[in-house]
Amino acid sequence: MATSGSAYSVDQEIADFFQKTTATRSACDSFARAHVGGDVVPVPVQGVCSCTVYAGDNAEFVVQFRLASLQLSMKIAKLARSIYGQFAPQVTVLGQIGEVTENKEALYISVISRLRGISYLDLILAYNSLRKNIINNITKYTYLALTYSDNLHSRYKNDLDLLLASLLGRFYLLIRESLNSLSAIFSLPIVLVHKDFGVCNIIVNETSCNIVRASNFSVEARGLDDNTIRAIKAARIVGLLLSRGFTSRVINRPEPVPIRDDESGAYNMHDLDG
């Protein structure tokens, strides 16, 4: 992004991005034009790890050229689609462009069905008085995922069992208590986390100021009993153990394994020690 106080330039952002890759902007534009047709137009605000353009005869596609080390997870894209249906885009991977060198990366290419609308940021600037609609819709959107659990219980149990064996002694009681709390934790609502759920990533219908078409419903907030509070606290501990108790969970890296109580795991152990 542009530095504070300076004018934002899409072309400059794109030029800066292509310094990180062996692919060229012209090659990417040609690829988008050849595969989905139409004019190729950069999206108004670019990310730091990708170049994103609109393309297609009616600009109905988003084509994203993303650094290979940070490529989109198709598993997560499919999961979002299965949970949110029409409110999550369809994603197709078309391979890569460019070569990997010592200092530069290739780019992975994704074609994404475009969700028409304006960003929440633009909505705030243009329709400040109608923001209540979008806030209500965000609540509904989040609610769509509350019934999802898949096999998380068994996956978390397996990971905690691995930690129990790896960090035996130092965190034994904490991990054992976390294992015993899993049933209570999974009685709580669960949602699919969007880690960049910001004003530029929420697409809004410019006419209705809504992001969803679901029927109206409400969820009343009530006081939490002691058991629920304990389950929430236990969930936070489990989250920390599964996050900091393992090596990095990064796309295109080796599968995460439990950290060791030695120099290699010292940084994460510091976080676990609190």
Image (spheres, rainbow, N blue to C red):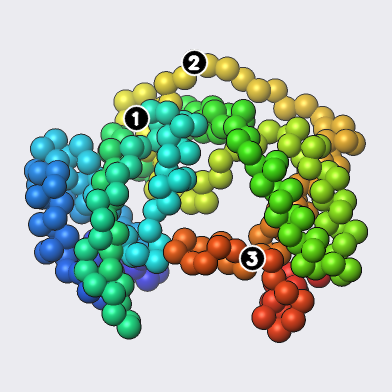
Mark 1 in CB contact with mark 2 (< 8 angstroms): no
Camera-nearest residue between 104 and 255: 255
The disc, 1 or 3, on the residue closer to the chain's N-terminal end is 1
Q: What residue type is labelled 3?
A: Val
The disc, 1 or 2, on the residue closer to the chain's N-terminal end is 1
Camera-nearest residue between 116 and 186: 186
Give x and y (percent) for residue 272: 77, 67
Q: In this view, does 135 lie to the left or right of 161?
A: left
State the residue at coordinates (67%, 80%). 264
Residue beneath disc 1 = 205
State the residue at coordinates (64%, 65%). 257
Residue beneath disc 3 = 257
Q: Quadrant of residue 262?
A: bottom right
Give x and y (percent) for residue 91: 33, 42
- Quarter of the picture containing the N terminus is bottom left
Residue beneath disc 2 = 215
Packing grade of label 2 (10 A; few <14, some 14-19, many >=20) is few
Q: In this view, does 107 lie above or below 233?
A: below
Give x and y (percent) for residue 96: 25, 60
Q: What residue type is labelled 1?
A: Asn
User: Disc 1 versus disc 2: distance between alpha carbons?
Assistant: 16 Å
Packing grade of label 3 (10 A; few <14, some 14-19, many >=20) is some
State the residue at coordinates (57%, 17%). 217
Secondary structure under badge 2? loop
Q: In which quarter of the image is residue 270?
A: bottom right
User: Disc 1 versus disc 3: distance between alpha carbons?
Assistant: 43 Å
Secondary structure under badge 1? loop
Say which of marks 1 and 2 sits in front. Answer: 2
Secondary structure under badge 3? loop
Q: In this view, does 80 lie to the left or right of 18?
A: right
Task: Using the image, tell me which numbered label, if any, was put on residue 61.
Answer: none
